[in-house]
Amino acid sequence: MTDTSLEAQILKAAAKSGADDLPDFPDDQSDLPSDYEYVPNDDDDEEIIEDITESDLLKYLDQQRDPLQVVQRLFYHEINTLSAQKHEHDWKLKCIPNRCMEELYGQGWTQMDYLLDLDTLKGANQEAVHMLKEGKFVPAGRVKDVEDDPFRDNNARDDAIIWMDPAANDNPPFFQKVLDFYSGPLHDDLSSMIRLNGKTEYQLAYYHPNNARYERHRDALPTDDPEDTNQRRVTAILYLNANWTNGDGGELKIHGHENADTGLEDSADRYVHPLLGRMVIFMSGVTDHEVCPAKKERFALTAWMR
Ligand SMILES: O=C(O)CCC(=O)C(=O)O
Ligand SMILES: [Fe+2]
């Protein structure tokens, strides 16, 4: 492990945050014997990172290394150079437009409309409404996986969720089509450009029209380690809301990127309306985002790919 690995940086950040039961992480590893193993204490890692909040840790990591550059190294090749763009036709993407792949690389996120046909989208919307009536959604803060995540503040989100699996045999038919799209052409395109070698999680979320929201957060820590599948790498969200209009709230707010050196905003905040068939894809380790209070029932299907 080098001292720039994600794990080493987390330990360093935790040590700096004033967790006094931690010994200082050695700054200069050249003094150490080559077989030195840093064992902060006998407790497991979860114990360590509980002492630092997610936003403090991200602030620390962002100061050390520009997170956009970190996640760009997950791509098999650079994309936004003239010579790379000459070879665009070699990418042979099945569904994601080249321009959107460039955006995903260059700014960490992109947006597309109608990758799926309207009948499938409307059908999936109806099925989501039906699952809601049947009481299938569980408040996210009470789902075990979410509860156990030491980073997640359960008060940060008001949505209710259903975990989904393309291989399940009881998926509603239109959802099956949508999940097959995710695990087929969409995953093929992304994994042909970005190092993905772990599992994908699928979650359908429902936001209640009484201002349900999800506070600013990031879905993963920035990593460029091809072997590390602990972190989510790509987030892909499909909105399933028919007849959404301006006053309905529920926008996805994508926070602008702050330059680590100057402290200035490099890009502006952007708002994405959660319209039927719209898909947002972002690099999970770099894109800060939040869901603005919803005034109308709001459904979104999210896949996190590792
Ligand atoms: O539904 C959205 O637009 C985003 C949801 C989200 O950020 C999450 O579930 O992590
Ligand atoms: Fe998120």
Image (cartoon, rainbow, N blue to C red):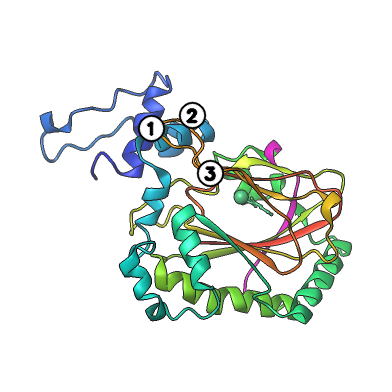
Q: Nearer the viewer, mark 1 or mark 2?
A: 1
Position of residue 200 in the picture relative to residue 223 (left or right): right
* Magenta span of residues: 155-166
Residue kind at label 1, given as amino acid type: Asp
Residue 97 seen in render: yes
Q: Which residue is mark 3?
A: 267
Contact? badges 3 and 2 (CB < 8 Å): no
Q: Residue at x 35, y 53 (%)?
A: 224
Q: Nearer the viewer, mark 3 or mark 2?
A: 3
Element on which disc 1 rests: loop
Counting residues from the N terminus, which is met first, the one under dot 3 or under dot 2? 2
Q: CA distance from mark 3 to mark 1?
A: 14 Å
- Residue type, numbered disc 2: Ile
Give me the C-alpha separation between circle 1 and circle 2.
23 Å
In the image, residue 228 lies at what x, y percent? 37, 55
Residue under the image location 28 percent in, 27 percent down: 25
Q: Position of residue 240 (x, y in %)?
A: 76, 66
* Up/down of 170 relative to 9, above or below: below
Whether residue 167 is visible here, answered yes or no, is no
Say whether residue 77 is left or right of residue 57: left
Judged from the image, the secondary structure of the residue bearing numbered disc 3 is loop
**Looking at the rendered structure, which numbered label has been put on residue 242?**
none
Viewer-proximal residue, 27 or 86? 86
Is residue 228 toward the left or the right of residue 212 in the image?
left
Answer with the quarter of the image where residue 226 lies: bottom left
Identify the residue position indicated by label 1 in the image.
261
In primary-sequence order, the first of circles 3 and 1 is: 1
Amino acid at pointer 3: Ser
In the image, 55 versus 102, the foreground residue is 102
User: Horizontal and vertical percent for residue 169?
Assistant: 68, 80
User: Is residue 76 rendered to the left or right of residue 150?
Assistant: left
Q: Which residue is mark 2?
A: 52
